[in-house]
Image (spheres, rainbow, N blue to C red):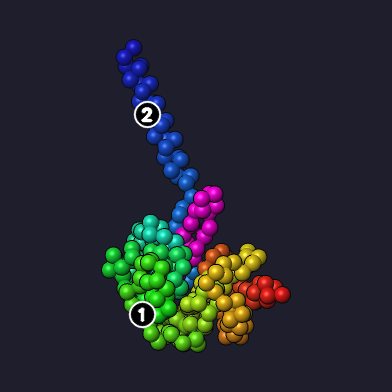
């Protein structure tokens, strides 16, 4: 009788473990890494709002020799830790430097995590100023050459450029000329977007002007990465321009 009872406990224990494992496996990923081209990956982190809604936020990972360059952190400190673990597991190269494209949390909330891991984090001068004023984690390097609207700076194989105020006063974009991939960040809206989104720290009129310029400048783009939502092509730029124009009517 004792043997049967012990066997019953053992089977029950296995069922509990199996159920727990299945529950863990069914939990959606909070960070994903997707290959866009050779040596270029999209990182997407999912922020969960209090009502349970999950919202994706995109960044880039670019291979530079034996290390990686990160464009934007994940959306928060814990998610940035998850991102670094995913990079270690899937790409197996260290992140040596990063650039955050503006001061909002979906771009820069993981700055202190990167810096604690020895990553050099760079930003526009206004991003450094704004994160300091907000009491947020501050990037430890300023690229002063990006200060003026229209400025372009080489950043490894990337070209960083500051078109001027748009979604945010400090929104910077990144262009990978060899791959013709444009990281528009939050200044570019995905095709799923039906509005211009958050304008609290932006300039809608300037945003329309710079988007018109982007439409002319990046007709050769084969891939355009928005700050949120699905990657697309050149059509994301014309879609963004239309959303802004409709908002101003």
The one nearer the camera, 125 or 231, is 125
Query: Residue at 54% across / 49% down in the picture?
Result: 51
The one nearer the camera, 175 or 114, is 114
Query: Residue at 44% across / 61% down in the picture?
Result: 75
Q: Which mark is residue 157?
A: none
Kindly identify which residue carries mark 2: 13
Give yes or no for residue 156 being in the magenta stretch: no
Quadrant for residue 198, please give it: bottom right
Q: Residue furthest right?
A: 249
Q: Where is residue 239 drawn, in percent x and y?
A: 65, 73
Q: Where is residue 60 drawn, in percent x and y?
A: 45, 70
On screen, residue 185 versus residue 108, left or right, reads: right
Quadrant for residue 199, please give it: bottom right
Callout 1 touching callout 2 (CB < 8 Å) = no
Kindly tell me whether residue 210 is visible in this rendering. yes
Query: Residue at 57% across / 77% down in the picture?
Result: 203
Give yes or no for residue 54 being in the magenta stretch: yes
How far apart marks 1 and 2 lie (CA) works out to 56 Å
232 is higher (above) or lower (below) than 27: below
Q: Where is residue 209 drawn, in percent x and y?
A: 61, 83
Query: Reading the chain from its start, which is encountered first: label 1 or label 2?
Result: 2
Q: Can you tell which of label 1 and label 2 is closer to the viewer?
A: 1
Kindly identify which residue carries mark 1: 142
Instruction: Point out the image quarter for the C terminus.
Output: bottom right
138 is higher (above) or lower (below) than 75: below
156 is higher (above) or lower (below) than 15: below
Query: Residue at 61% across / 69% down in the picture?
Result: 196
Label 1: state its secondary structure.
strand
On screen, residue 242 versus residue 155, left or right, reads: right
Q: Residues within 10 Å of mark 2 (few under 14, many from 20)?
A: few
**What span is colored magenta in the figure?**
40-64
Instruction: Point out the image quarter for the N terminus.
Output: top left
């Amino acid at each position: 009788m004792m043997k049967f009872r012990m066997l019953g406990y053992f089977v029950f224990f296995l069922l509990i473990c199996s159920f727990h494992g299945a529950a863990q496996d069914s939990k959606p990923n909070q960070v994903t890494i997707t290959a866009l081209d050779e040596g270029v990956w999209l990182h997407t982190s999912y922020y969960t709002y209090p009502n349970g809604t999950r919202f994706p936020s995109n960044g880039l990972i670019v291979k530079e020799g034996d290390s990686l360059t990160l464009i934007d952190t994940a959306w928060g400190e814990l998610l940035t830790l998850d991102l670094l673990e995913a990079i270690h597991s899937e790409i197996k190269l260290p992140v040596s430097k990063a650039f955050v494209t503006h001061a909002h949390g979906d771009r820069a909330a993981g700055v202190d995590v990167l810096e604690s891991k020895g990553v050099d984090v760079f930003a526009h001068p206004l991003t450094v100023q704004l994160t300091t004023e907000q009491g947020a984690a501050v990037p430890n390097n300023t690229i002063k050459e990006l200060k003026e609207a229209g400025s372009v700076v080489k950043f490894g194989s990337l070209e960083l450029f500051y078109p001027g105020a748009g979604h945010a006063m400090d929104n910077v974009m990144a262009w990978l000329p060899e791959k013709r991939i444009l990281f528009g960040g939050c200044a570019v809206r995905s095709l799923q977007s039906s509005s211009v989104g958050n304008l609290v720290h932006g300039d809608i009129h300037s945003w329309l002007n710079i988007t018109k310029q982007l439409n002319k400048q990046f007709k050769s783009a084969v891939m355009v990465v928005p700050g949120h939502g699905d990657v697309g092509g050149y059509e994301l730029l014309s879609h963004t321009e239309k959303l802004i124009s409709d908002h101003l009517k």
